[in-house]
Image (cartoon, rainbow, N blue to C red):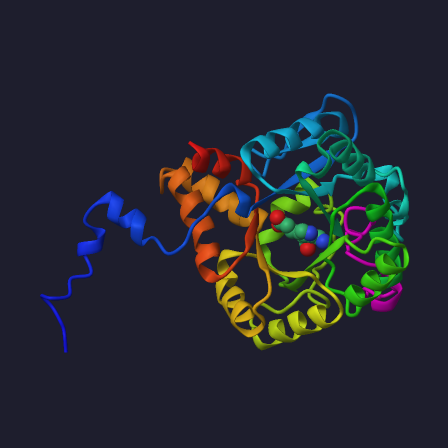
Amino acid sequence: MTAYPAIRLRRSRASSWSRALHRETLLTPADLIWPLFVTEGTGVEEPVASLPGVSRWSVDLIAARAKEAVALGIPCLALFPNTQSDRRSEDGAEALNPDNLMCRAIRAIKDSCGDDIGVLTDVALDPYTSHGQDGLIDDAGYVLNDATVDVLVGQSLNQAAAGADVIAPSDMMDGRIGAIRDALEDAGHVNVQIMAYAAKYASAFYGPFRDAVGSRGLLKGDKKTYQMDPANAEEALREVELDLAEGADSVMVKPGLPYLDIVRRVKEAFEVPVFAYQVSGEYAMIEHAAAAGAGDRDALVLETLLAFKRAGCSGVLTYHAAHAARLLGA
Ligand code: PBG
């Protein structure tokens, strides 16, 4: 048996060229999906207080962000609307309006960048409801599954008609992937992809996002009757299996770093494209840690993003996308 000193694992780490040669995982700008928040008005850049460095952009400024992403080699954007409050309602009907904020943003990006960048759109009702839940509620406040799915189908068709490339249902209703896929096929959107938020947990890490889309103050209670229990992993595999069977092209695990074990198990079990969402609370933790001097911001950003690749992700949704792409391109 060969052992120390014949074997010294530090040999390959001794110089930078050798570390580069032995590196098992590569992080590139092409691994990144950049979430952007859209708001009403013109010429508006509105910083989100709980997400330092992240802003909401009005539609007229969103194409410039898309061009920036293209220049940085980022292949895809994810859009989220901060719907004005007088357009939010009990039933979230604004989600079906072909001229809603989301659809105008999709068109602005597609008009200026075409196929140079993909546009992924979130499907769920929380940016449109007056109660902040992702679906329709009954008198007791319970989020109804099947009635919600009907609306999500309409929302998906609305986004696809505006030019969305990837429909990303984030609501965790049962059966919605199959219903949306059927509707997209029937409408001729055969190449519009579905990235299912397949294993999405009821997490404490979503707080800043809810500020950004304006739903935090509206939401009473939690989302535990539809989002997953953070204690569960086997259930995540069942969620993924069903979404794939219903026609999802790729699946997502969310949040990110605290759930890398789920990413790995999904990748090993299904060998399909797996994405992770490094969510708002994770982003904020890095920003606050760096601001407090607890770590180097750039190094924290790159190390956490690399970890997703190592765990088996095809890509990562991250608010650090543009910054990370700049670091990687430098
Ligand atoms: C809502 C949605 C959420 C996020 C993406 N889509 C929040 C929630 O489920 O309450 C969270 C993203 C983030 O925290 O960055 N459908």
Q: Is 321 drawn above or below residue 203 in the view shown?
A: above
Residue 309, position as x, y percentages in the image: 47, 55
Location of the N terminus (image quadrant): bottom left
Residue name at image x 86 percent, y 45 percent: 161
Of residues 171 and 208, the one nearer the viewer is 171
Q: Is 5 drawn above or below residue 43 in the view shown?
A: below
Is 116 left, or right, of 7 in this rendering?
right
Location of the C terminus (image quadrant): top left
Residue name at image x 82 percent, y 61 percent: 180
Of residues 163 and 36, the one nearer the viewer is 163
User: From this viewpoint, which residue is outermost toward the left?
Assistant: 5
**Is residue 159 something one can see in this rendering?**
yes
Residue name at image x 15 percent, y 66 percent: 7
Of residues 17 and 203, the one nearer the viewer is 17
Is 176 left, or right, of 258 in this rendering?
right
Residue 55, position as x, y percentages in the image: 63, 32
Residue 155, position as x, y percentages in the image: 85, 51
Q: Which residues are magenta?
A: 124-148
Magenta: main secondary structure equals: loop
Find out whether residue 131 is within the magenta segment.
yes
**Is residue 136 something one can see in this rendering?**
no
Could you say which quadrant of the image residue 140 lies in? bottom right
